[in-house]
Image (cartoon, rainbow, N blue to C red):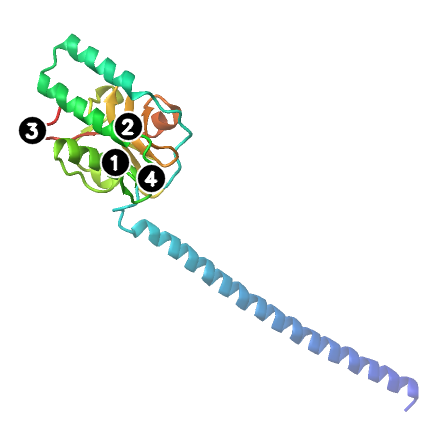
Amino acid sequence: MPKSYIYIIYILILIAAFEYYGCSSFSYTSRYSDNNNDEEKEKSEQRFSDNDTLAQIPDTLADDIDEMPEDSGIDITSVMNKLKLNENETDVDADNSTIKEKMLMEIIKYLDTPYKYGGSSPDGIDCSAFTRTIYGNVLSVELNRSAKEQYAQGIKIDKPEDLKFGDLVFFNTRRRVKPGHVGIYIGDNLFAHASSKNGVIVSSLEEDYYSHRFMGGRRIESDDIF
């Protein structure tokens, strides 16, 4: 057989071998890549599943993990002075006045208290612990622990103009849990609350952030309440 034919046959064998092993390598790589993709997909699904279970965690401590806006705060002494003027003008009974003043004084005690997720002391407090503490200390009324649970208590108030002093006010600040934030209405479209950004502060319902997220109020029934 001429040498030229031998070289041709030899080259064809090499090409065939290259293609065979090349395809095998490609197939292995493809299978390895597919396996990797499956593993990544499984991990991704697991991560999604893990995150999704957060919605099922009892909301006893989770109130407003979303950050509130920067807030300069409102001087509560002017609110107290105006409240006294209004009471003199409308001749509100003395006992009722005392309860309002007690609540305002209790709120003042907590002003500038830092926000602490799950906290319930003057060293750090979250929004529902703040409302719960004020109601407990002033009225001996036990509110539920979370904003979501407090939203189920009392009489529903839909419109801001129907709010009265001492009503709880609720806001939609979270994606999974509604409401995500709660405060105490103190008149003149103002409310006291534990903001995750500023700690305990007085803010206005007319601020864009709060007016757009207002979900309503709750009036807690009690013999000693306003």
Where does residue 132 sit, x and y in percent of width and height? 21, 37
- The quarter of the picture where residue 10 lies is bottom right
- Looking at this view, name the residue that lies furthest to the bottom: 1
N-terminal-most mark, 1 or 4: 4
Locate the N terminus and report the quarter of the image it occupies. Answer: bottom right
Q: How much space separates mark 4 and mark 2, taking CA atoms?
A: 15 Å
Look at mark 4 in the image and give the residue it sits on.
64
Q: Disc 2 marks which amino acid?
A: Ala
N-terminal-most mark, 1 or 3: 1
Q: Residue at x 16, y 8 (%)?
A: 89
- The quarter of the picture where residue 173 lies is top left
**In this rendering, which labeled residue sits more in front, label 1 or label 3?**
1
Q: How much space separates mark 2 and mark 1, taking CA atoms?
A: 9 Å
Q: Disc 4 marks which amino acid?
A: Asp
Report whether 122 appears left or right of 70. Answer: left
Q: Disc 1 marks which amino acid?
A: Phe
- Position above or below: 203 against 29: above
Q: How much space separates mark 1 and mark 3, taking CA atoms?
A: 22 Å
**In this rendering, which labeled residue sits more in front, label 1 or label 4?**
1
Q: Disc 3 marks which amino acid?
A: Asp
Labelled disc at residue 223: 3
- Label 3 neighbour load within 10 Å: few <14, some 14-19, many 20+: few
Q: Secondary structure at mark 4?
A: loop
Where does residue 48 sit, x and y in percent of width and height? 42, 55
Q: Residue at x 24, y 13 (%)?
A: 82
Look at mark 1 in the image and give the residue it sits on.
130
- Label 4 neighbour load within 10 Å: few <14, some 14-19, many 20+: many
Look at mark 2 in the image and give the residue it sits on.
192
